[in-house]
């Protein structure tokens, strides 16, 4: 008897809006509940407004838009670190987020402890962490700094550690937000090769980048955010063309 193929989206975003207070983000559940209406009070703005799309397993999606248009906010919703003020985000698979250089890492812990903590929080057993530990350290080229507090590493070294750990997780969805812009060319080549491997394994990739070259290399589908709204969803090349034309008008 043939096994039914699950064609449900791995990510579903429906009519999502996220409202920010200028200068700070109101994070409490009480504030979130009180702000669930559609109105906007003085000093507030919609970082995302009425955004909807579905993602199938194995898609490689690039997210484009000028700074402050909601790209990172969207990835944080998918990662589960933000709640929408309206609408719904449904993620059916585990997520490995690389959306901030220090995101998920504890500044005062050593590199060694951060590797174990982050991998463990994403479901790796102690045996699996031990098995992959040397592989992570070799990829990051960080062996001499294993007992150094994470906060004392340079931004480039922090990216090495974060990417090495996150890219070894077995989560089906990978979120990458501009971190490839940090680091030397040799390490970027290693990161590119690893992303190629993840895509070949059938992982779902979300990539936020201002590099057309990176977006065209990895992504077949693009999402274009403008003033918090999704203005285009289509083939990556077409979306980049539209973005360049619109961005040129604003320059």
Image: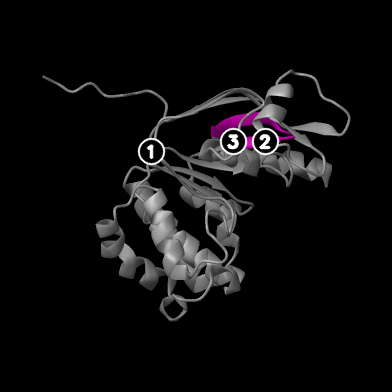
Q: First in sequence: mark 1 or mark 3?
A: 1
* Extent of the magenta region: 223-234
Neighbor class of circle 2 (other Cα within 10 Å; few <14, some 14-19, many 20+) is many
The residue wearing badge 1 is: 58
The residue wearing badge 2 is: 225
Q: Is residue 216 above or below residue 101?
A: above
Marking on residue 223:
3
Mark 3 and mark 2 residues within 8 Å of each other at the beta carbon = yes
Residue at image position (70%, 44%) is: 244
Q: Is residue 18 magenta?
A: no
Q: For this view, does 67 lie left or right of residue 44? A: left
Query: Splitting the image into 4 quarters, where does residue 108 fall?
Result: bottom right
* Residue closer to the observer: 192 or 11: 11
At mark 1, the secondary structure is: loop
On-image quarter of the N terminus: top left
Instruction: Give the color scheme: rainbow, by chain, secondary structure or one colour.
Output: one colour
Marking on residue 92:
none
Q: Is residue 164 visible?
A: no
Whole-angstrom CA distance, mark 1 to mark 2, is: 22 Å
At mark 3, the secondary structure is: strand
Q: Is residue 222 above or below residue 7?
A: below
Q: For this view, does 223 lie left or right of residue 130? A: right
Q: Is residue 162 above or below residue 144?
A: above
Magenta stretch, main secondary structure class: strand
Whole-angstrom CA distance, mark 1 to mark 3, is: 16 Å
Image location of residue 81, percent across then percent down: 57, 40
Seen as rendered, the residue at the extreme left is: 1
Q: How many marks?
A: 3
Image location of residue 186, percent across then percent down: 48, 73
Q: Is residue 228 magenta?
A: yes
């Amino acid at each position: 008897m043939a096994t039914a193929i699950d064609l449900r989206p791995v990510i579903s975003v429906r009519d999502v809006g996220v409202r920010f207070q200028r200068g700070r983000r109101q994070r409490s559940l009480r504030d979130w509940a009180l702000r669930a209406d559609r109105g906007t009070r003085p000093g507030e703005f919609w970082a995302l407004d009425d955004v909807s799309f579905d993602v199938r397993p194995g898609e490689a999606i690039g997210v484009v838009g000028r700074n402050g248009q909601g790209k990172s906010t969207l990835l944080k919703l998918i990662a589960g670190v933000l709640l929408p003020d309206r609408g719904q985000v449904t993620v059916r698979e585990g997520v490995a987020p690389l959306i901030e250089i220090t995101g998920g890492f504890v500044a005062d812990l050593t590199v060694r402890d951060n590797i174990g903590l982050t991998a463990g929080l994403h479901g790796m057993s102690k045996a699996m962490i031990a098995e992959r530990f040397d592989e992570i350290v070799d990829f990051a080229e960080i062996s001499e700094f294993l007992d150094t507090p994470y906060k004392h590493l340079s931004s480039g070294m922090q990216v090495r550690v974060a990417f090495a750990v996150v890219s070894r997780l077995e989560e089906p969805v990978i979120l990458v937000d501009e971190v490839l812009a940090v680091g030397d060319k040799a390490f970027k080549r290693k990161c590119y090769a690893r992303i190629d491997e993840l895509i070949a394994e059938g992982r779902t990739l979300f990539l936020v980048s201002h590099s057309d070259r990176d977006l065209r290399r990895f992504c077949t589908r693009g999402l274009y955010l403008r003033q918090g709204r999704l203005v285009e969803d289509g083939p990556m090349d077409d979306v980049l063309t539209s973005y360049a034309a619109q961005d040129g008008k604003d320059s």
